[in-house]
Image (cartoon, grey):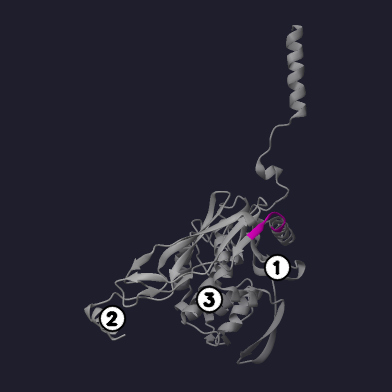
Amino acid sequence: MNRKRIISLFLALLILLTYPCPVRAEESSPLNITSTSVLLMEASTGTVIYEKNADEVLYPASITKIMTLILIFDALESGKIQKTDVVRVSEYAASMGGSQVFLETGEEQTVDTLIKCIAVASANDGCVAMAEHIWGSEAAFVEKMNERAQELGMTNTNFVNCCGLDVDGHMTSARDVGLMSRELITKYPDIYNYSQIWMENITHVTAKGSSEFGLANTNKLIKQYSNATGLKTGSTDLAKSCISATANKNGIDLIAVVMAAPNYKVRFQEAIALLEYGYANCKLYQDTEPQELPQMKVNGGVEDHVSLTYGTPFSYLSTEGEDFSNIEKSLELPESVEAPLEEGQVVGRLVYRMNGQELGRADILTQNAVEEAGWMDYLTQLFFRWLF
């Protein structure tokens, strides 16, 4: 081998030793995640901050109950049920195994109490009792769960029961759990009044008499992590240990989903690691007091002008440490709109930009409906103009 060949081989070897091969993002991440699948999401924007195998389809165990709680709160919001309603426990509901509060056939509990049983103690019997109370049967309730999942874009999810017991075909993914967790905490923040209960007693009243039963929160983060606000744990042989952990710090709501952790300790440790990673790397801009809106002229309506309001407040999550003082806002509104108008109709937008790049927009809506004017309305208007 000639001298030049030896020198070139030596230099190539030196370069390889000095500059090791690049690693994938997951391997270079400061998070040493051992669970099969995780996802970290900011709730107000839905921004995913970190993920690992987030679309892998897995058994969900009791984090299924997040969707069960969504349907319960949907029913409360629509007036279909009230928290004070009394629910009579069926023989089928009382027969549920796994995590339970030992409801008995014929026992009566309020909706409020059963929500506590589900959110705090992960009660399978409480889930089925509520499913039957709202939609007549668990099967009908599960059908609604799957419809709701589709509405939320949960493409990797199929529910077979309302409590999360291992059954073939009862599956979801970390991304889908993040989506339903976000829906629950942003649409129904009342859930926090239940998910943050550490311990509380309920009263069983049956033919045998009255007895106290203690609920203990399955989510130990409520005590272990100062920023924790919820949300739901799960554990079965096939699902292993799972959690959807919610937290709030400096006004930022984060959701950390951990699925198929090897044990409950790792589940909690990695949920905390994800949340701390999020709070260390995120900054949230929220425009809670956008600029004042003018009244808008209405053409051909029974009223000449309509008042305007903003839709959902604008939020922007930064993971790059941008200076929010550089954010610029521009109002985009037409000079007038044509009647008829519905209440809440989008008529414009407030656009947010930073360094020339659009960050997002807030919709501008009509505060009230305006009907189209008829010939009698025009005659009335002419009369009042002549009179005054």
Residue at (60, 76) in percent of width and height:
190
Q: Please tell me which residue lies in front, 109 or 360.
A: 360
Position of the C terminus by quadrant = bottom left
Residue type, numbered disc 3: Phe
The residue carrying pointer 2 sits among few (fewer than 14), some (14 to 19) or many (20 or more) residues within 10 Å by Cα, namely some
x, y percent for residue 363: 47, 64
Residue 244 located within the stretch drawn in magenta: no
- Contact (CB < 8 A) between labels 3 and 1? no
- Name the mark on residue 73: 3
Question: In front here: 308 or 265?
Answer: 308
The amino acid at mark 2 is: Gln
Residue 250 visible in the picture: yes
Locate the N terminus and report the quarter of the image it occupies.
top right
Residue 283 inside the magenta-drawn segment: yes
Above or below, 112 relative to 5:
below
Task: Please state the extent of the stretch shown in magenta in the rendering.
Answer: 279-284
Residue type for callout 1: Ala
- The circle on residue 381 is 2
Q: Vertically, is 82 above or below 13?
A: below
Which tag is nearer the camera, tag 1 or tag 2? Answer: 2
Q: Position of residue 143 (x, y in %)?
A: 44, 68
Point out the tag, 3 or 2, that comes first from the N-terminus. Answer: 3
For mark 1, what is the residue?
228
